[in-house]
Image (cartoon, rainbow, N blue to C red):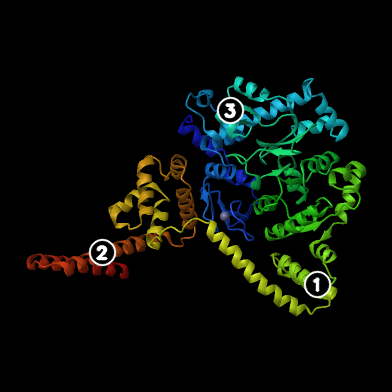
């Protein structure tokens, strides 16, 4: 990867308002001097994700993710530093000299995969729109599905011709290597060891990240034998669990209406969008996931489930309800009574029909009560059990209580009984959530003495103070390896003619997630120190005393093993002297 000059990096950072950049992905509200929002890196219902415009850093007190504007993009978009810098530069209108990009060293894989996917999307689109081989595909999309050419453009629809290697040959001509094309899932290796196109004779639906970059494809067979759909496998840039089809196109409509309509497939998304219902997205593959719910929660308050009216659709609806409620979204269920899926329905009844469906969408409880099996007492009990399990996911107690009143009168069961049943459930659900969070979160770092943490936070406020600290302390007076490491890094990267400690260079150069979160946490805690001057002196003294205590303990250890009388006397004298020093320090604290 080419190295971008540090002055340019500074310029990019200076012109990238961290609140604005993160604000594109997370709804931020002002809280004192900082901004707060729901963390994009873990599931939460109350915001612990904090952005400091003064310090140009972010930190989540829930999952310990943190860093600066570059690290945010890198972690959120799963890209490397150069790509993050590129995106920010583009956003800020800064031109990066071309020699920085046209470097002969190998580019990072992520970027190459993105470029290969973008190339393939353009290639397939060209095949669809402008070639004779694309005629059948054009007819299928236009006449059979009723998608107009404007829609082909918006969703970058394409056609993979009936050929074994047309993409492979063209991509190689354009400079893409076989390993990259294979890694991107665009080509496959045969048993003979030769390579062939993964998608052949298929209508191509590019799957995009919400930022608009193509990360994978869904391919629908046009004619003949074979599975109806094949999709890109998991790749370093594509994770089925974390992507939603249509989000790149519908993101702003969803954020604007605070509502998202969730449908099952590619065709449903495109049909609704073309009809003018643009706040629509679909999970990819079979199951809707908690990660996808989290992505939607960042944009919307309400989700309307509009799944197919078959058994699979019903099951997907029930699973979707639980996941969406747990993510903190309000859920409604719209049901198609005429026609099989939303795609069919919208072709018949247009936007007006969809609008009516949405207006008549049922709240979660009505939907579940309607579907409850009440043919026997046992079935009824099981249904109520299932309903309570779902309601227990709702974070808002008042809403739960309202639903329980409704449930109580519908099934003629005392509300108190339902309430205590749900409380018991609530506890186990919460415990499960906590347990799963603990499993996924990073191992806890060895605890750092509070005095060292506070002092380091204060030292990082300005360069003079940082340096001055070592008139009172030695590096070895600190016991925490993490604290010592930060001090060493400051000495490695700091330009001492500048008044501020430059943490951003450390973050950018080291690009270590643990270090990122540690530094950003320090910086945000720094703001909470009430009396910095007094705290600074107190911390130095506490660290000195702790250091002496460590030395005293070691002396005691040596003394207990010492057999030489002469040496023992010396150790004793040292011990007394140290104790005296400790008392002196204690007294200065009091005075
Ligand atoms: Zn978090």
* Residue at mark 1: C-beta within 8 A of ligand 1: no
Q: Nearer the viewer, mark 1 or mark 2?
A: 1
Comparing 380 with 357, the one in front is: 380
Position of residue 248 measured from the top left corner of the image (x, y, whole percent): 71, 40
Q: Which residue is drawn at 53% across and 59% down?
A: 439
Q: Quadrant of residue 74?
A: top right
| Residue that numbered label 1 is attached to | 380
477 relative to 523 in the view: left or right = left
Q: In which quarter of the image is residue 387?
A: bottom right
- Residue 40 to residue 579: above or below: above
Q: In which quarter of the image is residue 140?
A: top right
| Residue that numbered label 3 is attached to | 192
Point out the tag, 1 or 2, that comes first from the N-terminus.
1
| Residue that numbered label 2 is attached to | 548
Comparing 238 with 199, the one in front is: 199
Kindly report the distance in space between the C-alpha atoms of the residues bearing marks 1 and 2. Answer: 70 Å
Q: Which of marks 3 and 1 is in front?
A: 3
Position of residue 229 measured from the top left corner of the image (x, y, whole percent): 74, 39
């Amino acid at each position: 990867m080419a190295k971008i000059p540090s002055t340019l990096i500074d310029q990019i950072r200076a012109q990238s308002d961290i609140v604005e950049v993160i604000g594109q992905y997370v709804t931020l509200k002002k809280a004192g001097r900082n901004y707060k929002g729901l963390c994009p890196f873990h599931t939460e219902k109350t915001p612990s994700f904090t952005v400091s415009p003064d310090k140009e850093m972010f930190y989540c007190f829930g999952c310990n993710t943190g860093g600066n504007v570059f690290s945010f993009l890198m972690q959120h978009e799963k890209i490397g530093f150069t790509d993050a810098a590129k995106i920010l530069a583009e956003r800020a209108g800064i031109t990066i000299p071309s020699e920085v990009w046209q470097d002969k060293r190998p580019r990072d894989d992520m970027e190459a995969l993105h470029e290969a996917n973008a190339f393939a999307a353009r290639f397939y689109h060209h095949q669809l729109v402008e070639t004779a081989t694309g005629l059948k595909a054009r007819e299928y999309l236009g006449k059979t599905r009723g998608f107009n050419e404007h829609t082909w453009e918006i969703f970058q629809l394409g056609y993979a011709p009936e050929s074994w290697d047309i993409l492979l040959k063209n991509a190689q001509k354009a400079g893409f290597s076989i390993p990259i094309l294979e890694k991107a899932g665009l080509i496959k290796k045969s048993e003979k060891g030769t390579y062939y196109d993964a998608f052949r004779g298929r209508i191509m639906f590019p799957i995009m990240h919400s930022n608009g970059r193509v990360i994978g494809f869904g391919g629908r067979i046009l004619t003949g034998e074979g599975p109806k759909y094949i999709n890109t496998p998991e790749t370093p840039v594509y994770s089925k669990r974390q992507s939603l089809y249509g989000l790149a196109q519908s993101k702003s409509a969803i954020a604007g209406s605070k509502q998202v309509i969730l449908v099952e497939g590619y065709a449903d998304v495109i049909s609704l969008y073309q009809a003018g219902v643009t706040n629509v997205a679909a999970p990819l593959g079979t199951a809707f996931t908690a990660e996808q719910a989290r992505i939607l929660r960042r944009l919307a308050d309400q989700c309307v489930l509009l799944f197919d009216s078959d058994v699979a659709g019903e099951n997907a609806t029930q699973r979707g309800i639980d996941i969406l409620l747990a993510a903190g979204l309000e859920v409604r269920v719209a049901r198609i009574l005429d026609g099989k899926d939303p795609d069919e329905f919208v072709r018949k009844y247009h936007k007006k029909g969809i609008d009516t469906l949405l207006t008549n969408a049922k709240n979660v409880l009505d939907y579940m009560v309607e579907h409850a099996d009440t043919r026997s007492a046992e079935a009824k009990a099981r249904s109520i059990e299932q309903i309570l399990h779902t309601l227990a996911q709702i974070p808002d107690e008042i809403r739960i209580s309202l639903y329980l009143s409704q449930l109580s009168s519908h099934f003629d069961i005392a509300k108190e009984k339902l309430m205590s049943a749900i409380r018991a459930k609530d506890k186990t659900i919460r415990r499960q959530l906590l347990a799963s969070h603990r499993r996924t979160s990073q191992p806890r770092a060895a605890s750092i003495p509070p005095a060292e943490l506070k002092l380091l936070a204060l030292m990082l406020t300005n360069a003079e103070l940082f340096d001055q600290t070592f008139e009172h302390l030695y590096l070895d007076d600190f016991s925490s390896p993490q604290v010592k490491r930060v001090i060493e890094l400051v000495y490695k990267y700091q330009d001492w003619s500048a008044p501020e400690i430059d943490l951003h260079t450390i973050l950018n150069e080291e690009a270590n997630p643990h270090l990122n979160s540690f530094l950003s946490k320090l910086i945000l805690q720094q703001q909470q120190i009430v009396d910095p001057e007094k705290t600074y002196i107190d911390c130095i003294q506490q660290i000195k005393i702790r250091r002496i205590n460590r030395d005293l303990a070691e002396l005691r250890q040596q003394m207990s093993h010492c057999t030489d009388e002469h040496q023992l006397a010396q150790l004793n004298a040292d011990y007394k002297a140290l104790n005296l020093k400790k008392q002196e320090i204690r007294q200065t604290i009091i005075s």
